[in-house]
Amino acid sequence: MPSGKLAVQRLSDTIAHELERRILDGALKPGDRLQPERELAVELGVSRPSLREAIQKLVSKGLLHSRQGGGTHVTDRLDAGFIDPWQDMLRQHPNIQADLLEFRGMLECEAASLAARRATDADLQRIGEAYARVEALFAEGTSPEVLEQQVKADLAFHQSIAEAAHNVMFGHLTASLFRVINDHIDRNLRHLRGQASNWLDLQGQHQAIWDGIRHRDPAAARAAVRRHIDFVHESMEARAQHEARERRAKRGRPVDVEP
């Protein structure tokens, strides 16, 4: 028969749950290194043996992993398990990019609206810094190295907004989605970089998104993201048509002349 006694949770389990919460909240991201054991034990107010036991529990669960001489890091294995099959599917079925963009629109519009309502001062500082980095990099040249940094900065800006929504699902779904569409964003930026007017439009869209959030205007933030996604969709279709015409031209077939 049940004894009626409540089970007492081990301290290591409590510590493990706290670290899991930080991972879910986005305070600890895939690839992040944990603080040195001594510092983290002091911060949590626990003994180092208990902390060590908690870390080992999370290593066993696959949430953390240790690197030889490099400390303990949050694993990105969960992201990889989601990403790999989708990347393969994207390569085989390029039309699915439109579906991904449609999903991105639903996700990011709501995230921006929530961020405009919920962002803390610290969130606004992070978004502002991410936006400033986007602006600085977009003002630079078109070398492959710069473009790679531009893609990373663009993704970091949108990810900082998702995290400011203060909904764990937004943060993690957005991070996973961006890993999937990294190549798609790279190709779009390459296409837009060759057209000055489109490049200026893109910069203006980022400005409008940031303004809507920092001015605490959910409707404006949502509308700005919607315009941005629609613009990306249109540019994606334009690029696909251009590439199709080039393929036909290389095969020696007549190229359709659009009105």
Image (tube, rainbow, N blue to C red):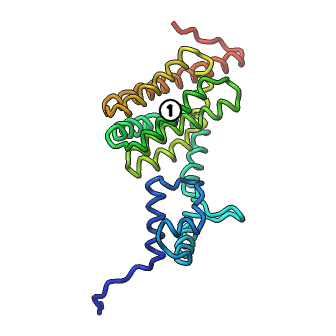
Question: Residue at position x 53%, y 66% from top?
Answer: 40
Number of residues whose C-alpha sits closer than 10 Å to that of mark 1, classed few (under 14), some (14–19) or many (20 or more): many
Q: Which percent across, then down, holds residue 11?
A: 45, 77
Quarter of the view holding residue 230: top left
Q: Is residue 91 above or below residue 32?
A: above
Residue placed most toward the observer, 7 or 35: 35
As drawn, which residue projects farthest toward the top? 259
Residue beneath disc 1: 131
Q: Is residue 96 visible?
A: no
Where is residue 165 shown, x and y percent of the image? 38, 44
The residue sitting at 57% across, 61% down in the picture is 35
Which percent across, then down, holds residue 39?
56, 65
| Observer able to see residue 109 | yes
Q: Quadrant of residue 220?
A: top left
The residue located at (56%, 78%) in the rendering is 49
27, 205: nearer the viewer: 27
Q: Amino acid at mark 1?
A: Tyr
The number of numbered discs placed on residues in the rendered structure image is: 1
Query: Please, is residue 19 above or below residue 27 in the view?
Result: below
Using the image, determine if residue 52 lies above or below residue 87: below
* Left or right position of 199 against 171: right
Q: Secondary structure at mark 1?
A: helix
In the image, taking residue 41 as reference, residue 193 lies left or right, namely right
Where does the N terminus fall, quadrant-wise?
bottom left
- Residue 33 in the image, given as x and y percentages of width and height: 60, 58
